[in-house]
Image (cartoon, helix red, strand yellow):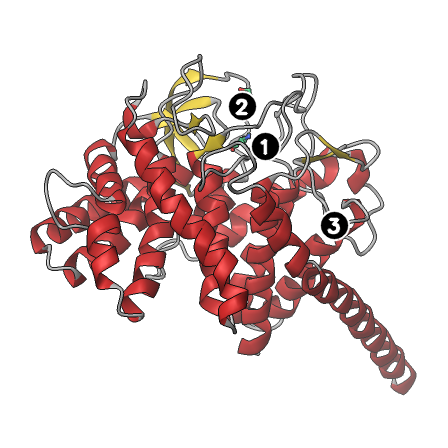
Amino acid sequence: MIAMMKLKFALLASLALLSLETSAGASSWLESHVDSSTRKLLANVSVPGAQLGSVIASPSRADPDYYFHWTRDAALAMDALVSLDERAQTASERAPIRQAILDYVFFSRVNQMAPALSDLGEPKYHVNGSPYMGPWGRPQNDGPALRAITLIRFARILLREGQGEFVRAMLYDSRLPTHSVIKTDLEYISHHAFEKSFDVWEEVKGDHFFTRMVIRRALVEGAKLARTLSDPGAADWYEERAQIMSREIESHWDAQEQVIQPTLGQTEGADYKTSGIDTAVILGVLHGYANDGFFAPEDPRVIATLRRQRAVFATLYPINHDAGDLGDAIGRYPEDRYSGSDFLGGNPWVLTTLAFSELLFRAAPFLALPERTVALRDAHAFVMRVAKHANPDGSLSEQINRQNGFMMSARDLTWNYAAVLNAWIAKEAAIHSQ
Ligand code: NOJ
Ligand code: NOJ
């Protein structure tokens, strides 16, 4: 009996040690890549020859050509910068970040005023600010919602600093017709919230959990800003639309399968996505959670969906076999065929693997023991997975080759660096809540 207990104790101790070691590695990898990720992200903003405030998705100009300002990628990159602006300790640390965000505000206004094929749902722009006019999956209505979310956070910072005049002139003018960036986006999404659009992966037209979550959050937070800035009629309207949206979003929970369905009512696009497994759902929670208890990271439905997705990717990719302590490399969805240059097979992605990490870091503080410990261990393990495949200088391409683990597709993907910064911020918050 005593011998057994001793054995059990030794086993537990070594397990604890193991998880401590992995988490130390993951913590220090994140820590040591904050500065370089910030630099690499900023390097893709206002690149030489481009308009100030434009954000290229990647410097790659062929296979794939990502030398465009995607409304979505740009908003997500800027959202990470807003978080860094909030945390900046010194004026000199803040200056380049603040400048990039301000330039982005002006560039966004240029985008909004340019006549595009799908209005503000236009997915991508040239770096001179004009909309891309070639064939594409459009509209993508997550774009203006994400831009509004980012700039609402920025407006709050400026209001705290007493810069109400700039906020009322450029960001939210409480007028109709409006000349300000946030209100222009809120008007568009509030009027087009229930129309089908192309998904975050630009391939399927329908009603998407991701798109709906970010539209809802923009409306909820937009309503609060509208109230602060004496625009109560608009605040009521945005709130009302958000409430209807909440009911629509609830219908994505599939109680039978115990997963959140990524897309309902598909009308166009890729016809080979049949599994209902899509990590866009996790991203929808990360970027669409409005801090009000609605589909929070720790929501059992979200955790169940993540677990199911993870199990699918664990067996799908050869690099995940015999992974040991490493987390599994996670892709967009199992049927994915897009490799960056052809449609011969999909791969795990950096930003989706980091999304699993961030989700668990954000959920962990709200989970009971022992689930909390497991979530934290797993969150670290997903970071270690990305660390293993990153280039030696910390640069991160869009995809991780499913066979050999090398970085592939678009190099220096801007969104990846935002994902590193978000994972780091979530990790810090989780550790401080302990
Ligand atoms: C580029 C898109 O961004 C990607 O998501 C998609 O798979 C391919 N084009 C094909 O539509
Ligand atoms: C393909 C991704 O699917 C899409 O989400 C992204 O906006 C573009 N690449 C640009 O990075």
Q: Quadrant of ligand 1?
A: top right
Query: In 3D space, how far apart are the residues under numbered discs 3 and 2 (Cα atoms)?
Result: 33 Å
What is the C-alpha distance between the residues marked 1 and 2?
8 Å
Dot 1: element: loop
Image spot of residue 77 (x, y percent): 50, 47
> Does residue 57 appear to the left or right of 404 in the view shown?
left
Given contact means CB atoms under 8 Å apart, are the residues at marks 3 and 1 in contact? no
Percent position of residue 215, x then y: 31, 42
Could you say where residue 83 lies in the image, as x and y percent from the top left?
A: 47, 61
Secondary element at tag 3:
loop
Instruction: Tell me how far mark 3 sits from mark 1, CA to CA.
Output: 25 Å
Quadrant where the N terminus sits is bottom right
Nearer to the camera, 367 or 394: 394
Query: Relative to 409, does residue 298 appear above or below in the rendering?
Result: below
Q: Which amino acid lies under the numbered mark 2 shown in the image of this protein?
A: Lys
The residue carrying mark 3 has its beta carbon less than 8 Å from ligand 2: no
The amino acid sitting under disc 3 is Gly
Q: Which residue is label 3 attached to?
A: 394
Label whose residue precedes the other's in the sequence (3 or 2): 2
Q: Quadrant of residue 378?
A: bottom right
Image coordinates of residue 330 in percent, x first then y, are 66, 41
Residue assigned mark 2: 273
